[in-house]
Each structure stands twice: as C-alpha cells, then as structure tokens.
Image: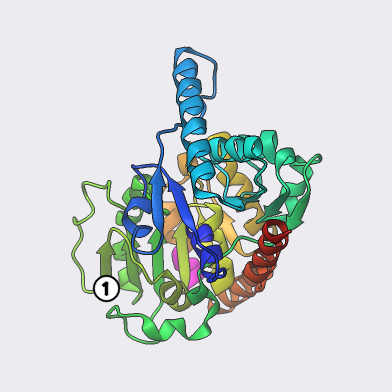
Amino acid sequence: MFPAMALAQELPKYDIEWLGVSNRLETQLIPQHYKLNTIAVKGFQEKFGFDTFHVLGELMISVLQVYKLLQQGKFHGVFTTGGYIAAPALVAAKILGIPVILHESNALPGKVTRFLGPWCHAVALGFQVAAQYLPKAKTIYTSTPVRSQFLDKNSIDDLDLNIPENVPLIVVFGGSQGAVGINKLVRQCVHAWFAVGAYVVHLTGNNDPEASSIHHSQYICMPFYENMAALLQRASLAVSRAGAGSLTELAICGTPAILIPYPFAAEDHQTYNAHVFTEMCAGLYYKQSELTSEVLQNKVLSLINSPKQLKQMGKKAQEIVLVDGIQKLAKLVKEVVER
C-alpha cells in the first residue's frame, strides 16, 4: 500500500482510484485520500485442493468486478504493486486493452508477477536481483517507492515521542500487521537494553494480547506509528520483519537492522529480501525458529556498544536503493499511460 501511495503522491494531476480488499489496512488510510473500491479475492493455495476451486471462483467474480469498474470509469492505465489482488486487475485490464505497469518489491517475485508479468507493458523492480526470475518480462529497476517524508532529512524534527537526545534508540516493528513472534522475543530482552540506557519504541500491531504487559519509562509501545520516517531516521537500530517496503524505508533512512523474516511468507520471499541486506553488510538475518531471546538480547547489546559498526551498516543500507526511484517510476507510468 505505501509504495502505491508514494507513487500516487508523485502524480498529482492524475485522477486516481484505489482497488483493495475489505480486511486490510487500506480501508483505514486510503478513503481520506482516494476513492477506494474493494473486491473479494484470496491468495492461491500452495497445494491443489478443494479450496482451489473456491479461490478460482472468487477470482472469476473479481475479474468481472474490476472489468466493470475499469470500463465504467474510462481508465487510461492500471498500476499494481503485485500480490493476489493484482491478478483480477491485470486480467481485466488486458481484456480491455488498458496498459498495466506492475511494480514488484520483492527480491523473489510473487506468483502473479512471474505468471502475468509478460502481459504487462513494464515490470518495475524493487531489487535488481528480481530480474533473473522474469526473463520474459520487460523489467526496469526503480527501487521501491517510499513516501515523500522518507526523502526529507529533516523529518526527524517531526518526531513527537518523548525520547532524549543522544540515547540509543531501538525500534521494533513487524510491518503493517505486526509480528507476535518478534514481540514475544523482544519482551524478554528489553530490560537488559534498558539497563544500558537504550530506549525502545515497540510497534506491536493490533493482534498481540500481551502488547501492554511492559511498563517502563524507556519503553514506548503502540500498535502503529504514522511518522515512520522520523522514527527510523532517529533510530540507532531496528528489529524488523523483512518485507520489501520496510526494508526500503530502512535503507532510505540508513537504519541498520536485525531482520527476522516472517516464516510463513509466500515462498519464503522475506528471506530472499533479507539476503539483499546481509549481502551488503547492512543488517543481520536470523530465522525466527532458530532465534532465542538470549541471542537477540546479546546481539543488540553488542551493536549498541559499537556505534562505528552501526554507522557503517547504515551507510551500506543507503547503497541498496535509488534515492530518485520514485521519480523514475513516475516517469515510467507517464510514458506508458500517456502513450
């Protein structure tokens, strides 16, 4: 959602409508900016089974819904950030002859991108390594778009949290849905981090029943924080999942990270993303199943006590992404749609 919002902000003269599903974060954030159209569609199952027929039936219905939406709205182009919702949009646009630009954020492209990427006028890539999985598609490397505040080095001035200057700040987040597995590990570690003077901002998501179980003057806990640009620019270190959007935001802000990929992500794509960071020495990667609270606690302490290493990791992170990626992607969209 956030990469798509970043692109939309870069196209102020365009009339934009949004396509989403009813149980995701876009229902909370999109309507205040753009008209939101929702459809019912699910991801494909890993194995063929009874549920496959139900999913295919929903897909056919959603293609028809999007077809009618595109036809009635007289749209000139479709931009999608991939995932299962891209399939009905892409198929419907193809039937109507409407150009499609697909942006693939992940290092390992998803099924929809691999299968339908060749149908698109262009596939923009968040990571260069993704091109090897899309030999038949027209690809262009643009990085993953981030919201404009991430490109403003003064965003840190807008941080409205009570955190003293010159203290280590550890930011913990699991993406838009939170990460209960990471939350449990972190809660076992934080008191050791407090003891060395570190502050912790813990974004728990909305699904953690123990979210409010720790109370400490150096601990700030909330489900979600809007001004992530300011927070990551201030952070000394992040403990995070390895979603492509989160990694791009970390890289733009030069925030070193300990990455714990979501173990149930489709085709383990977050691990592929994490490898991009580790190969650049911009972060460390641990499998959740193998990570103990003791290892996490001590690794964070080691990094907090090595500011020089953190600084080097932050510089390496900034080399992963294109600072002008959003302009490059917006230019591509304009060329395809207006042509």
Q: Which residues are magenta?
A: 300-305
Residue 322 as seen in the image, left or right of residue 56: right
* Residue underneath mark 1: 218
Relative to 44, say whether 145 is above or below: below
Relative to 137, say whether 124 is above or below: below
Q: Does the stretch in magenta take in 8?
A: no
Q: Residue extending furthest right? A: 135
Report the front residue among 177 and 303: 177
Q: Quadrant of the C terminus?
A: bottom right
Q: Residue at x 53, y 78 (%)?
A: 307
Q: Return the x and y of residue 316 as percentages of the image width and height.
A: 66, 70
Q: Return the x and y of residue 144 as percentages of the image width and height.
A: 61, 60
Secondary structure at numbered mark 1: loop
Relative to 332, say whether 101 is above or below: above
Q: Residue at x 33, y 66 (%)?
A: 225
Can residue 36 be seen in this snapshot?
A: yes
Q: Residue at x 62, y 68 (%)?
A: 326
Q: Return the x and y of residue 193 as percentages of the image width and height.
A: 35, 67
Q: Residue at x 45, y 73 (%)?
A: 229
Which secondary structure is most common in the magenta stretch?
Answer: helix
* Amino acid found under the numbered disc labelled 1: Gln
Report the front residue among 26 and 254: 26
Residue 214 as seen in the image, left or right of residue 159: left
Q: Return the x and y of residue 102 as percentages of the image width and height.
A: 64, 49
Can residue 265 be seen in this snapshot?
A: no
Q: Does the stretch in magenta take in 304?
A: yes
